[in-house]
Image (cartoon, grey):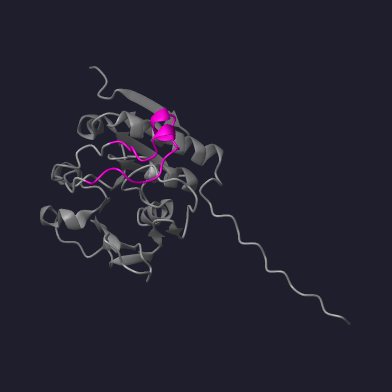
């Protein structure tokens, strides 16, 4: 049988596939799903960061980020729910009518008390994990960020690495995490930083290149995404 992917890369404990997740998934073994799928909001393109990928497109035209594959179509979670594995799905408030009830929703408070704007104050993830709902306050409002300050954004709906690390904390027993809509690879970066095994599937070649680059740098330059400590305050001397 021919391969169901166009390309495969292994970087550390991360295995990355270029292809359609519904075609690639049946041949894989994984223990949990953590994903931010496209869910039909037809995200408006034309703003954002760049300069990260190997492709010169991102270096010369930072506003021309690739189209988000599938974002113009409603998301159907059934192929992923049918696996019966621990699952975290972001953006689930947009397709909650297709999901079973759950007590444990994860809420990312992106504003942390700052002024509202035309974008959502928070993002919501559905889970099938037992337990109460949880909230993570983590500022991520343009250049105002609690983490990754000065690091260019390379995906329109990019999550903070700290948010994905938080998610992985709800999957302590999963040896291998799958992100079937891996995008720029933030879930994989979080896995690399935490020593977790990861499988990422992405169907867009440009984002696949960016994912490979980011995960490589997460392994070989582990401090790239870590905020440097603030300098210690100077203390005035005293005459004795």
Q: Visible in this render: residue 172? A: no
Any part of residue 26 in sight: yes
Q: In front here: 191 or 239?
A: 239
**Image location (x, y in percent) of residue 105:** 25, 62
User: From this viewpoint, which residue is outermost toward the top?
Assistant: 1
In the image: residue 187, left or right of residue 216: left
Q: Residue at x 11, y 52 (%)?
A: 98
Q: Quadrant of residue 116?
A: bottom left
Q: Is residue 103 above or below residue 14?
A: below
Q: Quadrant of the N terminus?
A: top left
* Image location (x, y in percent) of residue 115: 35, 69
Residue sitting nearer the eye, 162 or 52: 52
What range of the chain is rendered magenta? 43-66
Which residue is at the far left?
97
Q: Nearer the viewer, residue 120 or 216?
A: 120
- Count of numbered badges drawn on the protein: 0
Magenta segment, prevailing SS (helix, strand or loop): loop
Where residue 33 sits in the image (x, y, percent)?
29, 46
Residue at 27%, 43% in the rendered image? 45
Q: Residue furthest bottom?
A: 240
Residue 25: image quadrant is top left
Q: Nearer the viewer, residue 90 or 12?
A: 90
Q: Position of residue 188 (x, y in %)?
A: 40, 42
Relative vertical location of residue 134 with respect to residue 50 in this rendering, above or below: below
Inspect the magenta stretch and tell me whether residue 130 lies in it. no
Q: Report the quarter where the C terminus lies.
A: bottom right
Left or right side of 235 for 184: left
């Amino acid at each position: 049988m021919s391969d169901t992917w166009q390309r495969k890369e292994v970087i550390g404990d991360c295995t990355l596939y270029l292809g359609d997740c519904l075609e690639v998934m049946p041949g894989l073994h994984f223990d949990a799903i953590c994903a931010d799928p496209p869910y039909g909001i037809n995200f408006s393109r034309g703003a954002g960061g760049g300069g990260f990928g190997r492709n010169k497109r991102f270096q010369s035209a930072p506003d021309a980020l690739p189209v988000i594959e599938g974002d113009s179509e409603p998301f159907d979670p059934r192929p992923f729910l049918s696996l019966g594995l621990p699952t975290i799905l972001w953006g689930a408030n947009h397709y909650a009518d297709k999901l079973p009830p759950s007590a444990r929703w994860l809420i990312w408070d992106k504003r942390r008390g700052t002024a509202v704007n035309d974008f959502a104050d928070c993002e919501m993830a559905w889970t099938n994990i037992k337990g109460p709902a949880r909230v993570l306050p983590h500022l991520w409002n343009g250049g105002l960020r609690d983490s990754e300050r000065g690091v260019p954004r390379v995906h329109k709906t990019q999550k903070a690495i700290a948010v994905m690390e938080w998610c992985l904390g709800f999957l302590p027993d999963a040896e291998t995490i799958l992100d079937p809509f891996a995008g720029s690879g933030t879930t994989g970066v979080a896995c690399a930083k935490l020593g977790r095994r990861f499988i990422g599937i992405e169907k867009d070649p440009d984002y696949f290149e960016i994912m490979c680059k980011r995960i490589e740098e997460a392994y070989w330059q582990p401090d790239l995404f870590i905020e440097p400590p603030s300098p210690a305050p100077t203390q005035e001397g005293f005459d004795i």
